[in-house]
Image (spheres, rainbow, N blue to C red):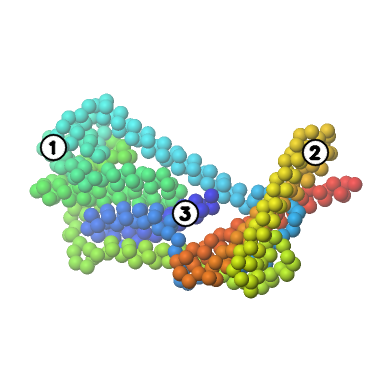
Amino acid sequence: MSDLAAYLLRSGAYLALFYAFYWLVLKRETFFALNRAFLLGAAILSLALPLLRVPSPFFESVVYASPPSVALDPAGVAVPSRGAEPLDILLAVYAAGAGLFLLLFLVRLGRLALLACRCGCVRHRGLRVVLCGSPGESFSFFNFVFLNRSKIPEGDMDRVLVHELAHVRQLHSFDIVFSELLTVVQWFNPFVWPYKRSLRETHEYLADRAVIAQGCSLARYQLLIVEQHVGGRLLELASSFRTSQIKRRIVMLSKQETKGLARWKPLLILPLAMALVLAFAESRTVVKESPAVAAAPSAAAPIPQEKSEEEIIKAWKEKVLQLEEMKKKNQETMLKLEAKLKEAPNAATKEKIQAAMNEQKIMALEIGAKECMLQMKKVEYELNKETDPAKKAELEHKLQELHVKADECMKKAEVARKATVGVEKPAVEKK
């Protein structure tokens, strides 16, 4: 669960930074095709980059081969970590929000399908033209173009069709569907909403330019944009003739096309992405020997490095067998206690049996911690022999994971012990 939360936060941060760069550097430029590519690439990178596990060249974290903070006390109560509860609640809220936006997306798809079925369509220049009888604006979705003749003068019908044909040929509907699915994933991110608007504005700029390229008078087309701006509400999944704000569209039509070195600005996403990857990189793991290794022998005691390889492997296997035997006895005891709990004649007896079960649960938890520590010694031994940098990095990562797992087990044991003391103390005072 924590991994999912970390991924979502990093993905949202990537998208926010990429869009901030677009808004500051690229928004006012007129290389619309490159801007569209930048916005799509930014969204894809924001979803992909958090999956990369890159060691940081600047920061490091120390991992002890045998954690000094882990005390192998055989008693305690296995209580779930209370720190995870707020995270679980947040993830449940996120899942509910994502489900809601996915449902809205499917409803909008259904509305478009229903509209096409109700009005029927005719073929025209490779398009499926749907003549809508109800009031509304003209728009397109994939190769469907929805027209309302009552709002379009006869002389301007061809220009509107050219505009919508540009949306269809340039596959703008794929971008819209992608941005809607991105919204489902990143609905909590305040930057995803202006991102969607900017992507649709870019679509309109590209379609407007396609109409002018067909020989339409700039002044006449700008007047048509003004006329079409007054109308009904836009269907959210459509590429509409009036999606963007009218002022920006007219300004962009009149603006000179960006040329020269400025056209290379979108490529700045590459060094920006590299900088962000390094900024979010994981700390390098440095393995050190614990300064306070326990001298007393235990099931997870360090395996002496002075021995031969055969002796080390043999000692490690013996300790694995010890832990397996401890685990087996623990499971057998738990089964017996569960059977006794069902047959307990009164509440006092049940309370005693429950206390014994808690002891066994914590013992199972600490056996798991000892297993992790024993695995850490094996990985450490392999790490000392390994010379391949890639395999060495993999072993260091595995060692860090085992360290975290062992530490979490023992922290749960400590919390459980405190909870047990808190429960038993009032009973003693009462006596």
* Callout 3: SS: helix
Looking at the rendered image, the disc whose residue lies closer to the viewer, 2 or 3, is 2
Q: Is residue 430 above or below residue 296?
A: above
Question: Quarter-wise, where is residue 323 in the image?
Answer: bottom right
* Callout 1: SS: loop
Query: In the rendered view, does 31 fall on the left or right side of 194?
Result: left
Query: In the rendered view, does 295 fall on the left or right side of 131?
Result: right
Q: Position of residue 288 (x, y in %)?
A: 59, 72
Graded by Cα atoms within 10 Å as few (under 14), some (14 to 19) or many (20 or more), the crowding at tag 2 reads some
Graded by Cα atoms within 10 Å as few (under 14), some (14 to 19) or many (20 or more), the crowding at tag 1 reads few
Q: Amino acid at mark 2?
A: Lys
Q: Position of residue 391 (x, y in %)?
A: 47, 65
Toward the viewer: 170 or 378? 378
Q: Position of residue 430 (x, y in %)?
A: 88, 46
Q: Residue at x 34, y 56 (%)?
A: 42
Tell me the residue that label 2 is attached to: 350
Q: Is residue 213 above or below residue 311?
A: above
Looking at the rendered image, the disc whose residue lies closer to the viewer, 2 or 1, is 2
Q: Residue at x 22, y 58 (%)?
A: 31
Question: Can residue 47 be seen by looking at this rendering?
Answer: yes
Q: Amino acid at mark 1?
A: Arg
Graded by Cα atoms within 10 Å as few (under 14), some (14 to 19) or many (20 or more), the crowding at tag 3 reads some
Q: Are marks 3 and 1 in contact (CB under 8 Å)?
A: no
Q: Residue at x 39, y 55 (%)?
A: 48
Q: Could you tell me how far apart the alpha carbons at marks 3 and 1 are, in whole angstroms?
A: 45 Å
Tell me the residue that label 3 is attached to: 7
Tell me the residue that label 1 is attached to: 125
* Of callouts 3 and 1, the N-terminal one: 3
Q: Amino acid at mark 3?
A: Tyr
Farthest residue to the top: give it.
118
